[in-house]
Image (cartoon, rainbow, N blue to C red):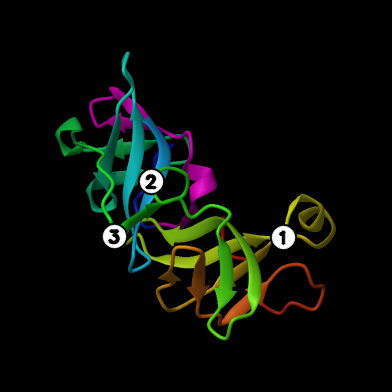
Amino acid sequence: MFGKAGDSLRTFSLLKGMPVYEKNGDLLGEVCDIVIQESGQVSHLLLQCKGLIGNKHTVPIKNIISFGHDGILLESKELLTKYKGKPSEYTMHHDKPLMKKHTLSQIGDQLGLLDDVYFLEELGTIIGYELTDGFFSDITQGKRVIRTPHPPKIGKDAIIVSVTKLRGGKPYDEMSKLPK
């Protein structure tokens, strides 16, 4: 079912592959990535559109009617624009990818590799980063989620985040889980 935008947090991994429909019910494509601004905002969804060529298009987060569990609803296909990466934009997998990029604290501590982001649907504000130390570490210790009130500093080789609270991997963690 479709829900009202802004009801919850989303992660990129939950959005990837999700179908996007026009409000009349026509399938426009599926989410293949997110566009992240230098300010740490998710500004657009990147869609793999249907058709023989399968062009990639973007749609601004602010123009989405609703994020549902089984699909995303968009007012009109006229809101789609052909994707052209910009120097101030990043994605998880495509142009200037952030996935598996080293993540450091503001004091230079290695926190892990970026694996996912948590963001508010309606605003696109990233409020958490899911980090990994690798497959075996994830199995034995779990992934960590870092909450941050400030935008990241995204460099060529690493992401610097302001760490407020850390969750994961330790039985004495006090931070509650982020909503799914």
Quadrant in which the N terminus appears: top left
26 magenta-colored: yes
Amino acid carrying mark 1 in the image: Asp
Q: Where is mark 3, residue-wise? A: 88
Counting residues from the start of the chain, the first of labels 3 and 2 encountered is 3
Counting residues from the start of the chain, the first of labels 1 and 2 encountered is 2
Q: Where is mark 2, residue-wise? A: 95
Q: Nearer the viewer, residue 169 or 174?
A: 169
Q: Nearer the viewer, residue 172 or 156?
A: 156
Q: Is residue 45 left or right of residue 114?
A: left
Q: Is residue 90 left or right of residue 112?
A: left
Residue positioned 45% across, 35% down in the render: 18
Residue 42 in percent (x, y) is at 36, 57
Which residues, given as a range, are shown in magenta? 7-29
Question: Are discs 3 and 1 less than 8 Å apart at CB?
Answer: no
Counting residues from the start of the chain, the first of labels 3 and 1 encountered is 3
Q: Nearer the viewer, residue 61 or 177?
A: 61
Q: Is residue 169 visible?
A: yes
Amino acid carrying mark 2 in the image: Asp
- Label 3 neighbour load within 10 Å: few <14, some 14-19, many 20+: few
Q: Where is mark 1, residue-wise? A: 133
Which type of secondary structure does the marked residue at label 1 adopt? loop
Residue 161 in percent (x, y) is at 50, 75
Which type of secondary structure does the marked residue at label 3 adopt? loop
109 w.r.t. 26: above or below: below
Residue positioned 41% across, 57% down in the render: 7
